[in-house]
Amino acid sequence: MVRFKNRYVLCEVVAEEPRGRPCIEDRAVGSAVRDAIARAYGDYGLACCSVSFTVKYLNAYTGTVLLRCRKDFYRLLCSALPLVRQLESRGLRCPCFLSTLHVGGTIRSCQKFLIQHNRRQLLTLLQNCTNEEERQRIRQSVLSCSLMEEQPPSGDEEEDDGTETD
């Protein structure tokens, strides 16, 4: 059995209007990328890239997209990404472009890069703050984003539904 090697392309959706990003769907990103490949390389390029092309991950709020394609044809995909000018989903057109951040052999390597990239972005955001209040709000929002386990309610507390237990 032959193992087909893939490449994962981590992209960022840079929209002119960031409020329009939450309406983006993975189907819209996939079709826009396929259209760009078809415009750039025709039917041959589209057939080569679409064999294992999928949108593996999409976070519309941060604008992060993870695309998968075959190792032999990832250069076709990367060179066609600048041709994406808009994404259309749910009848709305969002003018934007895709910026390639990283190309990796595994999803895990792309995740590691994304963590480092977000840390660098946070540092530049903190350095560009104009006053201490803004800096404190950014720090507080970062600290509030940590994952914490909820404590299960203990049986000693009384219930607030108006009934008393004896």
Image: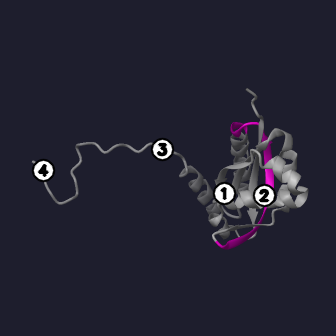
Q: Name the residue under label 2.
A: 33
SS state under label 2: helix
Does residue 33 appear in the picture of this structure?
yes
Numbered circle sitting on residue 26? 1
Tell me where residue 17 appears, x and y as whole percent: 71, 71
Q: Mark 3 points at which residue?
A: 148
**Depth order, front residue of 81/165:** 81
Q: Write the start and end of the magenta stretch as one range.
A: 91-109
Other-residue count near label 2 (Cα within 10 Å), few / some / many at <14 / 14–19 / ≥20: many
SS state under label 4: loop
Whether tag 3 and tag 1 are in contact, CB under 8 A, the answer is no
Q: What residue type is labelled 3?
A: Met
Whether 106 is among the magenta residues is yes
Whether tag 1 and tag 4 are in contact, CB under 8 A, the answer is no
Whether tag 1 and tag 2 are in contact, CB under 8 A, the answer is no
Q: Nearer the viewer, mark 1 or mark 4?
A: 1
**Depth order, front residue of 164/10:** 10
Q: Which of marks 1 and 2 is nearer the N terminus?
A: 1
Q: Which of marks 3 and 2 is in front?
A: 2
Tell me where residue 38 appears, x and y as whole percent: 85, 58
Other-residue count near label 4 (Cα within 10 Å), few / some / many at <14 / 14–19 / ≥20: few
Spatial CA distance of label 3 from label 1 is 29 Å
Q: Mark 4 points at which residue?
A: 165
Spatial CA distance of label 4 from label 2 is 63 Å
**Depth order, front residue of 83/17:** 83
Q: In which quarter of the image is the N terminus?
A: top right
Spatial CA distance of label 3 from label 2 is 38 Å
Q: Which of marks 1 and 4 is nearer the N terminus?
A: 1
Q: What residue type is labelled 4?
A: Thr
Spatial CA distance of label 3 from label 4 is 32 Å
